[in-house]
Image (cartoon, rainbow, N blue to C red):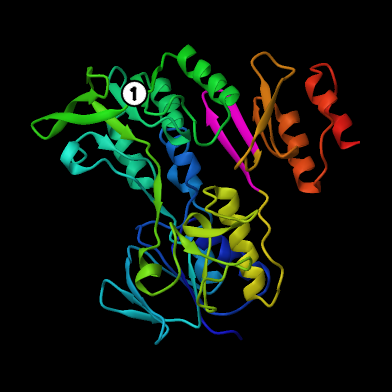
Amino acid sequence: MAGRLVIVGAGQAGFALAAKLRALKDGRPITIIGSEPCLPYQRPPLSKKYLLGEMTFERLLFRPESWFADNNVEIRLSTPVEAIDREQKIVRLFDGSAVAYDQLALATGATPRRLPTAIGGDLGGVFTVRDKADADALADEMKAGRRLLIIGGGYIGLEAAAVARKLGLEVTLIEMAERILARVAAPATAGAMRAIHEAEGVVIRENTGFVRLIGLDGRVKGAELSDGTVLDVDMVIAGIGVLPNDQLASAAGLETMNGIIVDAHGRSSDADVFAMGDCAVQDWNGERVRLESVQNAVDQAEAVAAVLAGGNEPYRPKPWFWSDQYEVKLQIAGFNLGYDETLTRPGAREGSLSVWYFRQGNLIAVDAINDAKAYVTGKKLLETGRQPERAVLLDPAADLKQLLG
């Protein structure tokens, strides 16, 4: 039997690694160390159905508690890790104990950026959205009629806006860039999503930065914006990105660069230490990137499991993402990094469309808004490396099935 595997992080990637090893009939001892008090769970529904009260937390659990004992997986919850001692091959915990490992997997995820204390980030009523504790705190505060300011026009901010409007809050969203989704989507996708939110009553202010929050008796009451206006607000959600949790790795001497650098097999600069998920930096067409998605966390973890079980197949990311906002499903296949051209195609349903991204003439990604056929077609093209015929894409009446031939 192989030696003990210690997994730091009890989220999507950490659980997927352990589950895949057991599915591969790998019987090595496994210890999962998690800082949260609850069993591993799905995060995406937290800010949607769970926050809306449409899904209980028990339904978010990957497996019941009995699964871990039945599969000889030790899980230690509410247990932050203090340090990694690579020389002695032990993980030191804040409670003073230590766990020895033969192989170590870091699935430490990422932490939301928070507003600085100097500008009001420590006031009551200021939130981020990442874990169960965040969602529970928000659920207690999101009451109809309250005035919510969302800082940041990325997917986190937009999803929060959709939930808040469903709950009856008044929502203002500010984005300092010239448009929402500026870093992650083309103008056509951003414009469509902006129109959807504005139709639902969200006030979106682009090219608008944030100066400071104004408090009263320790709680947020207002927000000063870069154009000099002051908004009356009851609560604030900061959706300004995340930082990879690579501090343990860096302190242990592993190579890091805005995340833990890994090779195509998920190995860090130490051959006995792997990393996966949101904390891992991997190669993507010659560039080092972090792929922040559930899909990548699972796929990369399962690829690492196969390597640990004796395989040698490199991980080749095939990214896909999704975002649910109101009754709108935005599905994304591929990764649009470095695109230099887009084509926009209306879908069969009213309000549906797809945006096709190209780099040097080659298809690299597709955004599909309420257009499942475009998403499925684009995903298959990307997986097979086939290039779509431009004439078919540009003809709204053409059947996309022709592209798969």
- In the displayed structure, 275 sits above or below 288; it is below
Instruction: Read off the residue under disc 1.
Output: 208
> Image quadrant for the N terminus?
bottom right
Q: State the image quarter where residue 156 is shown.
A: top left
Position of residue 244 measured from the top left corner of the image (x, y, whole percent) = 41, 55
Q: Position of residue 183 (x, y in %)?
A: 50, 36
Left or right, 311 with respect to 404, comes to: left
Task: Give the answer, above or below, for where 387 lies relative to 8.
Answer: above
Q: Is residue 381 left or right of residue 113?
A: right
Amino acid beneath label 1? Thr
Q: Is residue 103 visible?
A: yes
Give the x, y percent position of residue 319: 64, 47
Residue 85 vertical placement versus 134 (above, below):
below
Residue at the left extreme, as displayed: 217
Q: Position of residue 26 (x, y in %)?
A: 64, 76
**Residue drawn where x is 41% and y is 81% of the image:** 86
Quadrant in the picture for residue 239: top left
Is residue 49 visible from the viewing direction of this image? Answer: no
Image side of residue 257 versus residue 262, left or right: left
Quadrant hosting residue 123 = top left
| Residue at (34% x, 80% y) in the render | 98
Q: Secondary structure at mark 1?
A: loop
Q: Is residue 324 magenta?
A: yes
Residue 240 appears left or right of 300: left
Q: Which residues are magenta?
A: 319-332
How many callouts does the rendering have?
Answer: 1
| Magenta-colored segment: predominant secondary structure | strand
For this rendering, which residue is in front, 396 or 390? 390
